[in-house]
Every structure is written in structure tokens, then in C-alpha cells.
Image (cartoon, rainbow, N blue to C red):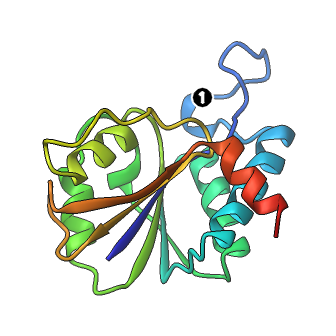
């Protein structure tokens, strides 16, 4: 399986007086534009998902919808395993049960950073923390902690530049 880990885009700031409860925070206009540009960067990297999994939180769902649309209309599925927090065991179990070639998982920090780190062997060099609308590709022969190989990790600016060049 090829797992693309994709962090949600820029959402309304917690300090904004219009900010709703955390679960209902939406992508800003800038967040939508940058997320769409980053998704085009994923397309330039030949990401063609069979499935897009998303956290149920609004900002992640919006990011996942953009990714699914830009990347060819892949099926979108909401899952509580990507809701956030620090546990990634449920994500590994959910992914291991799938018989698919490419999955995009959309969620939140720090959970996605932990997922990326735990996907790779323990002797990997230090990874960059994922920024909003940043992504990484991990290739697994069999989905399990420590069983993946990092193909690439891209910060959002680099993804947007790739998307603009196509």
C-alpha cells in the first residue's frame, strides 16, 4: 500500500471571535486556495488514491473533499481513527484491513506526525513536522508499525510549487 499522509489546511484561528468549537473550525479562504494548490502538487506526484480517509472534524473533511476532487474523485470515507490525539494503533488496524493500492489519510497534528514516525523503521533520521497542507508518502509491503519506507515528504510550499508547474 502507498499511504499519503496529508495534514489539513489552514483553518480559522482559535482567537478569531467567529471561531466555533474546535470540531467545527473551517478552512479559511486562504486555506482552501493553498490546500487546492497542494492537492495539485500531489497530482503532479502521480498520487491517484483508491480511497481518501478523513477525520470527521470540519477542517479535515474540507481538505479531504478538495483532495478527492483534485485527485480524480476517489471515494471519501470519514473515520474516527483520524480524529486526532496521539494514538495511531486504530489507524494502522484500519489501513491493514484495506486491500487497496493507494490511500490518502487526512487529519491533524500531532497524530499525523506520530503516524509518519511510527510507520518507518526506528533507525530513520529525524523527520520534519508536518505543516498545514503538507504531505508524505509511505510505501508498505504490509501495513504495520515500522514496516514502511519513506518515498517523500513535502512541505506545503513545495507541493504548491509542483502543482503550479503542471
Q: Residue at x 23, y 62 (%)?
A: 148
Q: Residue at x 22, y 43 (%)?
A: 124
In the picture, measured across the screen, residue 49 lies left or right of residue 10, that is left
Q: Residues within 10 Å of mark 1 (few under 14, many from 20)?
A: few
Count up the numbered dots.
1
Res. 52 visible in picture: yes
In the picture, measured across the screen, residue 11 lies left or right of residue 79, that is right
- Residue with the mark numbered 1: 21
Disc 1 secondary structure class: loop
For the residue pair 84 and 135, the one nearer the viewer reads as 135
Quarter of the image containing the C terminus? bottom right
For the residue pair 6 and 24, the one nearer the viewer reads as 6
Residue 12: quarter of image: top right
Q: Residue at x 71, y 40 (%)?
A: 26
Residue 128: quarter of image: top left
Q: Is residue 89 above or below residue 67?
A: above
**Residue 122 location (% of width, % of height):** 13, 43
Q: Is residue 33 above or below residue 101?
A: above
Amino acid at each position: 500500500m502507498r499511504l499519503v499522509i496529508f495534514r489539513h489546511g489552514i483553518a480559522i484561528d482559535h482567537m478569531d471571535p467567529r471561531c466555533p468549537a474546535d470540531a467545527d473550525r473551517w478552512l479559511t479562504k486562504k486555506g482552501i486556495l493553498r490546500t487546492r494548490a497542494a492537492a495539485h502538487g500531489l497530482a503532479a506526484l502521480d498520487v491517484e488514491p483508491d480511497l481518501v480517509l478523513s477525520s470527521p472534524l470540519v477542517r479535515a473533511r474540507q481538505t479531504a473533499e478538495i483532495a478527492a476532487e483534485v485527485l480524480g474523485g476517489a471515494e471519501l470515507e470519514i473515520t474516527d481513527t483520524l480524529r486526532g490525539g496521539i494514538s495511531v494503533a486504530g489507524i494502522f488496524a484500519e489501513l491493514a484491513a484495506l486491500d487497496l493500492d493507494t490511500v490518502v489519510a487526512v487529519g491533524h497534528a500531532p497524530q499525523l506526525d506520530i503516524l509518519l514516525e511510527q510507520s518507518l523503521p526506528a533507525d530513520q533520521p529525524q523527520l520534519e513536522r508536518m505543516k498545514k497542507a503538507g504531505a508524505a508518502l509511505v510505501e508498505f509491503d504490509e501495513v504495520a508499525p515500522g514496516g514502511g519506507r519513506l518515498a517523500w515528504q513535502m512541505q506545503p510550499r513545495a507541493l504548491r510549487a509542483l502543482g503550479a508547474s503542471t
